[in-house]
Amino acid sequence: EELLQLAQRMPKAELHLHIEGSLEPEMVFRLALRNGVRLNYPNVNSLRAAYAFNNLQEFLNIYYTGMSVLLKEEDFFDLTWTYLTRVHQDNVVHVEMFFDSQAHLERGIPIDVQISGIRRALQNGKEQLGISSKLILSFLRHLSEEHAFETLKLAKPFLDQLDGFGLDSTEIGNPPEKFARVFARCRELGFKITAHAGEEGPPDYVYQALDLLRVDRIDHGNRSLDDAVLVHRLTDEGKTLTVCPLSNLKLCVVKDMDQHPILTMLKRGLKATVNSDDPAYFGGYVNDNYRALIEHLPVTREDLYQLARNSFEGAWITEEEKTKHL
Ligand code: HPA
Ligand code: ZN
């Protein structure tokens, strides 16, 4: 009880959040109605019932379908603003969010519509909720590197509104090396880099993210634990892992929450953080993820402080901004 309250009231940063993954079934229906989009589900409950998956690909199929109701600037605004007001209740004070620009481009939504809607909500979040934020354009790894380069070109007029680049979608068969050149270009442009690695993919993909993409963080990274040398490398370099407990459970990356490796990660010196990934699909926001850990693992007060501290240390903010939060 006491631990739950502590987790609830601690100021936190969320570093692994796909904004399209915060699209709740209720909003899917609201936006479908507003935009005249036809859905293949008769009601909210039948859509929510379809949110059942056994692996990453099964989830992604539903996730890419769900976002088809996002058409206009105000849709991206409403999505982002709803997320921010929700996590404000969880005492999230800083967020670094992904958006899947290419998924929207493929549906004919211009990049300026996407970015300006999200950015306008982030600005409101700063002014009205005191939540600071970063925006990360995440390349889809099931598409080609050429497609990523074209997207980077489309983003050129808006680079001042982006803070970093990421890599997500179908991991197995799409290793980081496939995107070495485009991330080198992003780094040349001065951007931070992160990549999903070791969610379903092997430790080698985490090595590739480090060596070939030169990432600043690893998203998920669970399977790093299979390789003791890699664990040492990650701890030596102080690399943050953005871990997502409920996501791991729902996508069967872990069998049960009581098998979740996050405490092992902390014990081995890894800078693990707690994040929601796609909260509308995986059963909860940041504090729900903390609660799941507290209810199923021997979490201590010190673990909770460490996880929250790690979230600010791993954030792409200045040392001065960090000391304000720590
Ligand atoms: N992994 C890969 N791609 C994703 C995820 C994830 O957890 N969430 C949204 N896109
Ligand atoms: Zn993710």
Image (cartoon, helix red, strand yellow):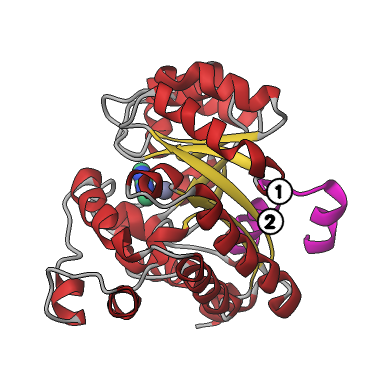
Task: Find residue 69 and report its horizontal and vertical position in percent.
Answer: 32, 66
**Real-space Cα separation, disc 1 to disc 2, in angstroms:** 6 Å
Q: Determine the residue positioned at 49% across, 74% down.
A: 78
Residue at the right extreme, as displayed? 320
| Up/down of 94 relative to 34, above or below | above
Residue 71 image-quadrant placement: bottom left
Q: Residue at x 54, y 37 (%)?
A: 154
Q: How busy is the neighbourhood of tag 2: few (under 14 within 10 Å), some, or many (20 plus)?
A: many
Asked whether, in this view, residue 9 is left or right of residue 263, the answer is right
Magenta stretch, residue numbers: 304-326
- Asked if labels 2 and 1 touch by Cβ distance under 8 angstroms, the answer is yes
Type of the residue with mark 2: Arg
- Residue at image point 70% right, 67% down: 123
Element carrying mark 1: helix
Circle 2 is placed at which residue position? 309
- Residue topped by disc 1: 313
